[in-house]
Image (tube, coloured by chain):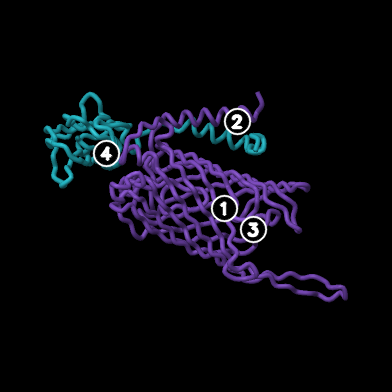
Chain colours: A purple, B cyan
Amino acid sequence: MSTRRIAILVWALGLVAASTQSVAAHGLIGQRFFPATLAIDDPFVADELSLPTVLHIRTGGSDESPPTLQTDLSGELSKRLSPNLGLSLGGTYTFLDPIPGKSTSGFDNMEVSLKYVFWQNAEHETLLSAGASWEIGGTGSKKIGADSFDTVTPQFFFGKGFGDLPDAVDWLKPAALTGALGLAIPVRRLNKTFSLDDDGNVQTTHDLNPKTFNWGFSVQYNLQYLQSFVRDVGLPAPFNRMIPVVEFAMQTPIEGPHTGRTTGTINPGIIWFGRYMQLSVEAVIPANTMTGKNVGVLAQIHFYLDDIAPKIFTWTPFHGVLGPTQPQ
Amino acid sequence: MTLRALLPARLVPILLVSGALLATVAPAWAHVFPDHSEPRVGHVLDTPPPAVRIWFDGAIEPVFSTLRVEDAGKRRVDRNDARVDSSDRTLLEVSLPSLPPGRYQVFWSVVARDGHRTEGSFPFRVK
């Protein structure tokens, strides 16, 4: 048996072992459970670990670069500092395999995020939060195109479950919407490039690092919510803990030569959540031809640290041990 | 797309480690959620049920667990004797009088053995 097949077998066995545990509770508001989404950040603060998140996609070629197989391996650790304030630290290792060309790999820039939940309503399964992320320029490798400058992104998040809809449309009650809006502001406004012209004179060109509006949302349909709170349709495990989801992750430059040209991906997929972790897989479909033309795959293993070991992972500097995430 | 294309060789160690992690997550207490119930969530009954019973996916604390049933006018209709079964700590039940036809809503709130709290509600109807 090849090493690859053994790896698949170990992963599958792990999946089976984990599926003998039952439902988790994470990102709870009222009776609504919101999972961690893959392409956009979710609105909750929690003690959790995403390891790994794997993106594999073939990017289209251009005049300047050949088609390239890109594989990103990412990890993110999130920690509550208070019941409503959370800090996250994330990193990505990227492999680039040009076709043809020499493969290269390296770390992308580290990212630090702070998020604060400032409003929540359990009856209406609604949550609002705000925060900021800081991509630390120069911490990544130039080989894979990591920026040498910082980028700061103020962000706004929301989550809304539709359990408060009237009974006439109770099949829609398991649905939920989350969203994330942010303005990515590069700290360095212009990149200077020096070159020699035909006469040997030094030419300086300035390339704008544009501000970009990052916007995304997810549409979810929680089968556990359907089964437990709306109608028991007899779904067996593991389907009774699945959440079909579609994520939209978009970027729109608001200045520079590409102003208003939105790129992004549409990611349909499935999230399965257990008591201590969730497993997710999504297709990554370019939203338009400017984004690309190839479909990729995005997968994640996500651990609920506050459920795995609440006394260890929910300690906070000012509020002591918070305990597991509780319904609000 | 073939499996080989989806699974580059460099992902093999990642899969091995994550598979091992999945398999070794130690059982522990955490939030409990309903596994199934009588009456079943959202179902219509021909005859009034003598009780509401909810089986959870873990043991629950009797002192902090509550269960009540309300009619469409939000009046409580159960016998106010909600209890955790002494021989099955995953079962929460409450007795009912003979209910007239109508729509009813069950409200539950439970605490797992280590203090994790979960809550919810579900409807059923009597013809």
Residue drawn at x 53%, y 31% as measured from the top left:
B20
Distance between the alpha carbons at the discs numbered 3 and 4:
51 Å
* Residue A325 is at least partly visible in this image: no
Question: Circle 1 marks a residue in which chain?
Answer: A
Q: Secondary structure at mark 2?
A: helix
Q: Amino acid at mark 3?
A: Met
Report the residue marked by disc 1.
Answer: A265
Which residue is at the front of the view, A233 or B59?
A: A233
Report the residue marked by disc 3.
Answer: A290
> Is residue A266 rendered to the left or right of residue A328?
right
Q: Earlier in the sequence, mark 3 or mark 1?
A: 1
Quadrant of residue B67 within the rendered picture: top left
Which residue is at the front of the view, A84 or A261?
A: A261
Q: Position of residue A270 (x, y in %)?
A: 49, 41
Quadrant of residue A291 within the rendered picture: bottom right
Distance between the alpha carbons at the discs numbered 1 and 4:
41 Å
